[in-house]
Every structure is written in C-alpha cells, then in structure tokens.
Amino acid sequence: MADLADGFIALPGGLGTIEEFIEMVTWGQLGIHAKPCGALNVCRYFDRLVSLLDGAVEENFIMPEHRAMVLVHENPEKLLDLLDQYEPPVIDKAKWILSINDM
C-alpha cells in the first residue's frame, strides 16, 4: 500500500495509527520514500505529538530537517496544500553522525 500512495495522512487514532504514521515518517527519513506525511489536527489532537517532536529537536534527538517532514494542520484543504508543496529534505547521513557527536 505504501508503494501505491502519493503521501500519508494520519487522522486521530490510537497506538496503531500513531505507530504507522511515525513509521512512514521514518521511512522518509531513511530515504525509503520521498512522500509527504501529514497529520490532520482535528480538535488539536496532534498538539502533544507536535510538542514531543519539537522537544526532541530541542534536545538534539531529531534534526530540524527531519522534524519539518511532519506536516500538521487542522484544515483538510490546507493540509493537502502543504502535502502538495512538500519537498523531502536532502541530508548527508554524515551530518547525522556529526549531530550525534555534538550531544
């Protein structure tokens, strides 16, 4: 199914939804695909996930370029616009090692 998709959108859901969404983001980070990943933030459902990701960036566990791969909006049309405009980051994996050494 991932091969056939043009992108991925998570709707509010449980652990399986969150796990599969993060897996698609991770596949993008690893270069398995270059497709956009978005979360439809119905009733601010994904605010805590966004805060978690932002905190991980602040603590140097996630690179800002990888955090930017997670597109979030409460308006479905605007989220689709963000997905349509998405360009995957191009990061030399050596930079990942350097960022780990900075921790």
Image: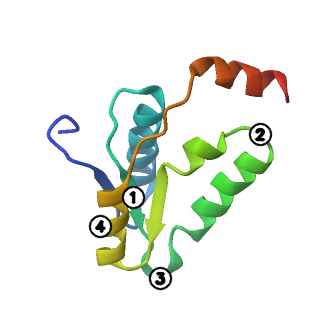
Label 3, label 2: how far apart the Cα atoms are:
29 Å
Relative to residue 13, is residue 73 depicted above or below?
below
C-beta proximity under 8 Å, tags 3 and 2: no
Residue at position x 30%, y 51% in the image: 8
Where residue 65 sits: x, y (%)?
A: 58, 43
Q: Quadrant of residue 10?
A: bottom left
Which quadrant does the C terminus fall into? top right
Is 9 on the left-hand or right-hand side of 93?
A: left
**Closer to the N terminus: mark 3 or mark 2?**
3
| Identity, as a three-letter code, of the amino acid under mark 2 | Asn
Check disc 2 and report its element: helix, strand or loop: loop
* First in residue order: circle 1 vs circle 4: 1
Tell me if label 1 and label 2 are in contact, CB under 8 Å: no
Image mark for residue 60 = 2
Mark seen at residue 38: 1
State how far apart marks 1 and 4 are (Cα). 8 Å
Say which amino acid is labelled 4: Leu
The tag on residue 83 is: none
Residue that lies at the very extreme toward the left in this rendered image? 4
Q: Badge 4 local density, few (<14 within 10 Å), some, or many (20+)?
A: some
Name the residue rendered at 14%, 40% in the picture.
4
Name which residue type carries label 1.
Gly
For the residue carrying disc 1, how many other residues have a C-alpha within 10 Å: few (<14), some (14-19), or many (20+)? many
Is 84 rendered above or below residue 81? above
In three-dimensional space, the C-alpha distance between marks 4 and 3, rounded to whole angstroms, equals 18 Å
Disc number at residue 80?
4
Q: Which mark is residue 43?
A: 3
Above/below status of 52 relative to 60: below
Residue 70 image point, x, y percent: 49, 53
Q: Are marks 4 and 3 in contact (CB under 8 Å)?
A: no
Query: What whole-number distance in Å separates the C-alpha atoms at marks 1 and 2?
Result: 22 Å
CA gap, disc 1 to disc 3? 15 Å
